[in-house]
């Protein structure tokens, strides 16, 4: 599909956003779209609600006093941030230069479109919302300006596809106002701590490598584990996270983890000294970049005839293509907090809606926008403003199994620094499709 051919759809969406506000879209009523599946179109029966109902609970979950409150409303105020770059795209009016939408806009645009479809479906279920959509890359109405002007003060939930530096600005505000802030796509804590109202959906690199270590220890009965890393502080940090996971692991069959510090001068002899011929060699490669990963894999591939290998890469490997002849037949895996085979009813609804409304297929960002919005707005409607007591309701699952857990950066801390999705999928790369390996999820 050529995305530039969808200029009309993109320009319409962006122009609509710009005309309403350079930074926000106030959505009071759902736009008509093609009908969702039957279970998304039937309003749920609800007991009549008072406009605001607040009840103190017996104790404070996670030692956060706000989490002990039950605050329910007739209608909730939701703010969604996405990187739309409206100032740049429409700098000279509503005409798009070159008649082609810049590629850097598409991810944020599709996140917004997925979120919008989720909001439409939730409205059909009877959820009453006042929603504001903000351009997180606006130069004139950035997050700090919105906070200073108090436009976010009455917000009950913030969902963002945001990165540094705005993620820290929004997080600090959310902490001050005790508003749950869901970071939907950024795989980093952004240096944030001491904020139990901050929820990370796209799990951090540390959580990914811990999941790899746990999987290879439990998934191979007899194995030789080698971490292959370059001599950089960053990749040394990844290795240290794996060592820490090994030290904490309570498993009587765990195998020790050895280390190979890689350079362009690394010889086949140096590699073979760490490999064994009588058992699976589990190689955890810490390179996040494609060029570095392929450089390492080329040399490892020469050892496959003698030493059985399973190569585990980083989350960034999900978009890498290993089509070169030397990689043929090499068993490779990567990790991801997201997995969607797109066979479920929600995926089909989203795909059909995009085809009918936008004449295109939804990207992964559209699925993430849909899922994050559906999951947390539904939690808001079910349990009120402080839904944190039960973040992992199986009944709210769409494509992904989330497992939000409190993260304590300091030992003996009484309050979480944030909550993070700790469910990590182990995915094997295939020629035409990738496959989920850990069946427990």
Image (cartoon, grey):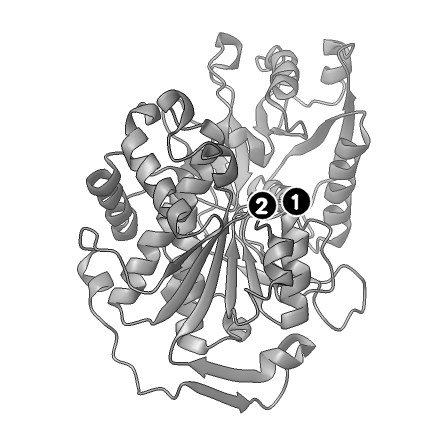
Q: Which residue is mark 2?
A: 186
Which is nearer the eye, 79 or 261?
A: 79
| Circle on res. 164 | 1
Residue at image x 63%, y 49%? 166
The mark closer to the camera, 2 or 1, is 1
Q: Is residue 373 above or below residue 128?
A: above
Q: Is residue 434 above or below residue 411?
A: above
Which is nearer the eye, 119 or 210?
A: 119
Q: Is residue 95 above or below residue 364?
A: above
What SS does tag 2 mark? loop
What SS does tag 1 mark? loop
Residue 165 location (% of width, % of height): 67, 46
- Left or right, 332 with respect to 293, comes to left
Residue at image x 28%, y 49%? 344
Residue at image x 74%, y 47%? 246
What is the distance, in whole Å, between disc 2 and disc 1 at their CAs?
9 Å
| Circle on res. 291 | none
Determine the image quadrant of residue 410. bottom right
């Amino acid at each position: 599909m050529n995305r530039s051919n969808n200029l009309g759809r993109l320009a319409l969406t962006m122009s609509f956003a710009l005309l309403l506000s350079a930074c926000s879209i106030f959505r009071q009523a759902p736009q008509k779209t093609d009908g969702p599946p039957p279970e998304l179109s039937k309003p749920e029966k609800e007991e009549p609600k008072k406009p605001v109902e607040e009840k103190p609970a017996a104790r404070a979950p996670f030692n956060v006093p706000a989490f002990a409150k039950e605050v329910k409303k007739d209608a909730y105020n939701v703010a969604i941030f996405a990187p739309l770059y409206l100032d740049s795209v429409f700098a000279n009016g509503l005409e798009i230069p070159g008649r082609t939408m810049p590629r850097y806009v598409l991810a944020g645009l599709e996140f917004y479109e997925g979120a919008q479809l989720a909001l439409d479906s939730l409205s059909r279920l009877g959820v009453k919302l006042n929603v504001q959509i903000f351009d997180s890359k606006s130069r004139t109405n950035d997050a700090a300006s919105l906070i200073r002007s108090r436009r976010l003060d009455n917000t009950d939930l913030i969902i963002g596809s945001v990165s540094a530096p705005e993620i820290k600005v929004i997080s600090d505000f959310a902490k001050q106002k005790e508003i749950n802030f869901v970071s939907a796509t950024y795989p980093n804590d952004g240096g944030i701590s001491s904020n139990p109202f901050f929820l990370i959906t796209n799990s951090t690199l540390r959580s990914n490598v811990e999941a790899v270590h746990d999987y290879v220890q439990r998934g191979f009965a007899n194995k030789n584990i080698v971490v292959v890393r370059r001599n950089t502080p960053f990749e040394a940090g990844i290795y240290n996270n794996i060592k820490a996971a090994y030290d904490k692991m309570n498993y009587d069959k765990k195998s020790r983890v050895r280390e190979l510090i890689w350079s362009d001068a690394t010889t086949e002899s140096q590699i073979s000294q760490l490999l064994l011929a009588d058992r699976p060699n589990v190689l955890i490669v810490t390179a996040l970049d494609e060029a570095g990963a392929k450089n390492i894999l080329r040399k490892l591939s020469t050892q496959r005839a003698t030493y059985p290998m399973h190569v585990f890469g980083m989350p960034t490997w999900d978009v890498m293509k290993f089509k070169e002849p030397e990689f043929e037949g090499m068993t490779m895996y990567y990790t991801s907090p997201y997995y969607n085979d797109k066979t479920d009813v929600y995926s089909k609804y989203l795909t059909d809606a995009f085809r009918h409304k936008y004449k295109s297929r939804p990207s992964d960002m559209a699925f993430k926008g849909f899922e994050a919005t559906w999951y947390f707005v539904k939690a808001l409607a079910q349990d009120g403003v402080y839904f944190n007591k039960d973040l992992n309701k199986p009944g709210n699952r769409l494509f992904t199994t989330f497992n939000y857990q409190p993260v304590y950066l300091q030992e003996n801390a009484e309050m979480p620094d944030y909550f993070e999705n700790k469910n990590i999928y182990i995915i094997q790369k295939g020629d035409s499709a990738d496959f989920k390996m850990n069946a427990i999820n």
